[in-house]
Image: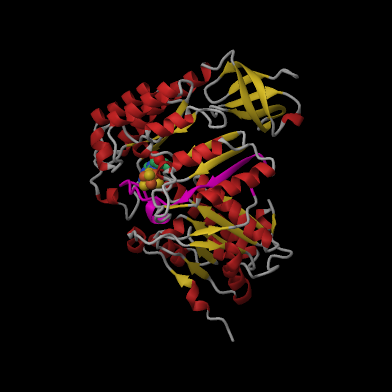
Amino acid sequence: MAKDYSKYFIKPSIRDARKRRKEDTPVLDFDDYFNIQGIGNGKTYRIETYGCQGNEADSEKIRGILEALDFTQSDDLEHADLILLNTCAVRENAENRVFGELGRLKQYKRNNPDLILGVCGCMPQEEQVVEKILKRYHYVDLVFGTHNIYKLPEYLETVLLSKERVIEVFSEEGSIVENMPKIRENTKKAWVNIMYGCDEFCTYCIVPYTRGKERSRLPEHILHEVQELIDQGYQEVTLLGQNVNSYGNDFTDRTYRFKDLLNDLHQMDIARVRFTTSHPKDFDEETVQILAKGGNLMPYIHLPVQSGSNEVLKRMNRKYTKEEYYQLVDHIYHYIPHASLTTDIIVGFPGETEEQFAETLELVEYCRFEGAFTFIYSKREGTPAASYEDDVPMAVKKERLARLNKIVNKGYLHGSKRFEGKTVKVLVDGTSKNNDSILAGYTENNKLVNFAGPTSLIGQIVDVTITESKTWFMLGEYHDGN
Ligand code: 5AD
Ligand code: SF4
């Protein structure tokens, strides 16, 4: 019987994505969905990944699936049989880059009509993006979202066999899929998802709509994955979630939370444990105290503040005040004096006054951030802030961003300078981008260090003495046998 392909035409709905239901999250097993063999035999693929670490981790799963289907990765974009763009929706310029890339890829499709061109990730979760693809990018063969990566084998089979377009985006909540195959980019450092989705609904942010309800992975699954990584020789794990501090809040059958996970990982034989991203409102003192145990828990915390003004924080729905943020930062420096803090800041949020912006500058100075991702507010259709009146002219937003970045860069340099003359532990990633005889790696405080040394050190954690600090990196000396 012929397959009914019309079912593969499900478009996203922001209304459905907004809903939150109480039911427990279903945990699916990828093996139950994987019954297609060899459809990628003799075919090459290429994935382009945009956006955050969550997308990078998803791309590793997509690669895992494609290689399980016998596709082979290729750098030759022009002759690839499958090109997938794993997209980010968090700001408009990220989306524009993807549309630009789709325009560029049109010629490849013209030269090779058998090329399968796909768009996945966060952008397809937005209704207007799918509409735009349908109208203007009719040469895109495959569109799927963040909740249904596990169905990729089925989608590819459909596109390959029937030459039908597949558009399937689930807008509701999502599940957790365990046992997805993964091809990791790095052999020493691994991403480990501990939760998916977000329930915060910061008013500027599209993520709760594109990634669905907050769902925590079961601790036994996380710890099992970390143990496997240890067995494979991994040195570092980074725990991923939009708000790792609320890990476990959705469990109905246990009281296990983020601090318990940190405690368990602290006992394990992995050299470095990192995590991102933290939400200040859920980062309690007890968690800081656990981090203060040190060992494999790294003294580096990314703690997005977004703004230093209580009025702006309120309109952003961040659910903390600047005073509470200051108190958390004080706790961190009290318990972990050598910690490095970084942050995210949005300037030019609708209605932000000069005085409110000045409070952000003051906060940045106070918190001694050693780095920050700074953004001009970008209006996202479907979010509450999209309907706020935005009376801050773009020229003012740009000027604020430049003023903020000046202070942030001072913090970067100051954060690096304090290590001059000190010996620090560096996990060696590889050779420096511009020079093969120079090694590059990161310190426990997440600072990039370049130093001369044999390539045999790659993948190891070694002692390096910092000789000079620049704004974005530090120079060091490695002494053999030290
Ligand atoms: N405009 C600008 N920046 C945004 N971010 C999220 N949404 C927006 C938006 N609409 C920033 C926040 C967040 C980071 C990942 O991206 O600072 O912490
Ligand atoms: Fe977006 Fe806020 Fe969730 Fe972060 S916590 S993903 S900024 S809604």
Rendering quadrant holding ligand 1: top left
On the image, which quarter does residue 308 sit in?
A: top left
Using the image as rendered, state which of residue 179 and residue 209 is in the foreground.
179
Magenta segment:
184-210
Could you tell me if residue 377 is visible in this image? yes
Rendered location of residue 474, percent (x, y)? 58, 22
In the image, taking residue 215 as reference, residue 41 lies left or right, namely right
In the image, taking residue 454 as reference, residue 274 lies left or right, namely left
Q: Quadrant of the N terminus?
A: bottom right
Q: Quadrant of the C terminus?
A: top right
Rendered location of residue 314, percent (x, y)? 25, 40
Rendered location of residue 320, percent (x, y)? 29, 37
Q: What is the residue that sits farthest to the front in this orientation?
A: 254
Is 40 in the magenta? Answer: no
Q: Residue at x 71, y 62 (%)?
A: 70
Could you tell me if residue 406 is visible in this image? no
- The vertical placement of 69 against 403, above or below, is below
Q: Residue at x 75, y 19 (%)?
A: 481
Using the image as rendered, state which of residue 2 and residue 92 is in the foreground.
2
Using the image as rendered, state which of residue 34 and residue 84 is in the foreground.
34
Q: Residue at x 55, y 46 (%)?
A: 192
In the image, taking residue 423 as reference, residue 173 lies left or right, namely left
In the image, taking residue 472 as reference, residue 372 lies left or right, namely left
Using the image as rendered, state which of residue 143 and residue 233 is in the foreground.
233
Q: Residue at x 34, y 59 (%)?
A: 20
Q: How is the image coloured?
A: secondary structure
Query: How many discs appear?
Result: 0
Q: What is the residue that sits farthest to the top in this orientation?
A: 421
Rendered location of residue 58, percent (x, y)? 55, 52
